[in-house]
Image (tube, rainbow, N blue to C red):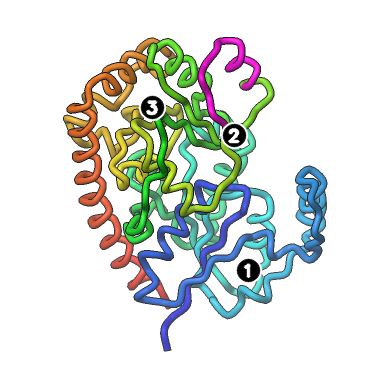
Amino acid sequence: MRKKLLLLCSEGFPGSFKVITNLKGVLDGIADIHILPIEQLFSLKPSIPNIRIKRRLQKIQTELRWMDIKMLERYANNILFTAWGPPYDVVLSKLNRIGVTPSLIMCSTPGQSELSRHELKDYHNLFNYFRQGKLKYWLLNKRLYDSLAGVTDHAIYFPHTINLGQFANVAPTELSGINVDLFCTTRLGKNILNQVLAFRVSGVNGTLHLNFKNDQLGSIISDIGANVLYHRWIPEAEYYNLVAAMDLSLQATFTESFNYAVAERMCLGIPVITSYDIYLTACDTFLAKYLCVQALDTPSEIGRMIKKIIGDAKLRASLAERCHAVIRRIAEKNNKEAVDFIAGFLE
């Protein structure tokens, strides 16, 4: 009988969900892998279309500890949390009471936590949980391990995986002209305004694709006259088809521990402008030269990079080819290391 592994994450953390969906795709051959949104553990799960009311109800249930962990008991210690927040504190306490010690895949950098403020308390709680033995392993990707291994004895290197199979049948959407995407969540640290301004000052005659609408940002985008096309949520397969049709992508963000948006674009052969904190691009001299921004808070610098890449089709093709080769090499290494660790982790 194959061993079971549960991957538990909040629906409110799309980046963390990317971590576990990619991990499931890589691990499916060695165990029965199940993904569960932590919201499914709330005792009351009414269908409420209003997100604010729904979150308020969840907050009340968290404060009252109305969370049921019966469906977790069969996994014993084979539970991996991803991300953190108040509902996790409740679930961890209930698991500890029945003798279960789960582990945690960490995603937020210290800088990201400081920007969002509430995550600073999460970091404080986690240090205490590990010191008290309430959590077993603190699994950290390359960047976080480099940052935290020197300050805690509980850090374990565990790379983010990349399920290459999900890109096998991608067919680029037909688009006309020059197309650049800035697809991301609107959390602090995504550096959205600087990148929109950079597209505008680059002078590129093309379309900037966005996957969000924000009243304040939208007003400024309208003020500066950027040529923007907004997209609603689309299914994953269609999303990859759309991304594959881009000439260039923008992910020059302030705070990232990995950034799956970058990894996905590299897998699709789309050059993507990033920061030097993204080792996926920074680890390669050629990619770093043309894709890694030195001054993230300077739209003109990002704009010059956009103009250079869009204006040179030969360079763009070379970057696309190198992106694809580099990410495949990283994926193969990370995936093997993750599989080897999980094979020894499962009880």
- For the residue labelled by badge 3, is the local secondary structure a helix, a strand or a loop? loop
- Left or right, 292 with respect to 257, comes to left
Stretch in magenta: 218-230
Q: Name the residue: 41% across, 84% down.
A: 2
Q: Secondary structure at mark 1?
A: helix
Q: Amino acid at mark 1?
A: Leu
Q: Residues within 10 Å of mark 3 (few under 14, many from 20)?
A: few
**Which quarter of the rendered picture does the C terminus lie within?**
bottom left
The CA distance from mark 3 to mark 1 is: 55 Å
Q: Is residue 87 left or right of residue 128?
A: right
* N-term-proximal mark, 3 vs 1: 1
Residue at x-position 17% and y-position 28%: 314
- Can residue 300 be found in the magenta stretch? no
Q: Are marks 3 and 1 in contact (CB under 8 Å)?
A: no
| Circle nearer the N terminus (2, 3) | 3
226 drawn magenta: yes
User: Which of the two residues, 74 or 284, is positioned nearer the viewer here?
Assistant: 284
Per the image, the residue denoted by label 3 is 177
Location of residue 117 in the rendering, given as x and y in whole percent from the top left corner: 62, 32
Q: Mark 2: which secondary structure?
A: loop
Relative image position of residue 343 (x, y in whole percent): 33, 72
- The kind of residue tagged 3 is Gly
- How far apart, in angstroms, are the residues tagged by discs 1 and 2? 37 Å
Residue 269 in which image quadrant: top left
Q: Nearer the viewer, residue 285 or 174?
A: 174
Of the numbered discs 1 and 2, the one sitting upstream in the chain is 1
Disc assigned to residue 95: 1
At x 28% / y 27%, what residue is drawn?
291
Q: Residue furthest bottom?
A: 1
* Mark 2 residue type: Phe
Which residue, given by chain and number where applicable, does mark 2 sit on? 212
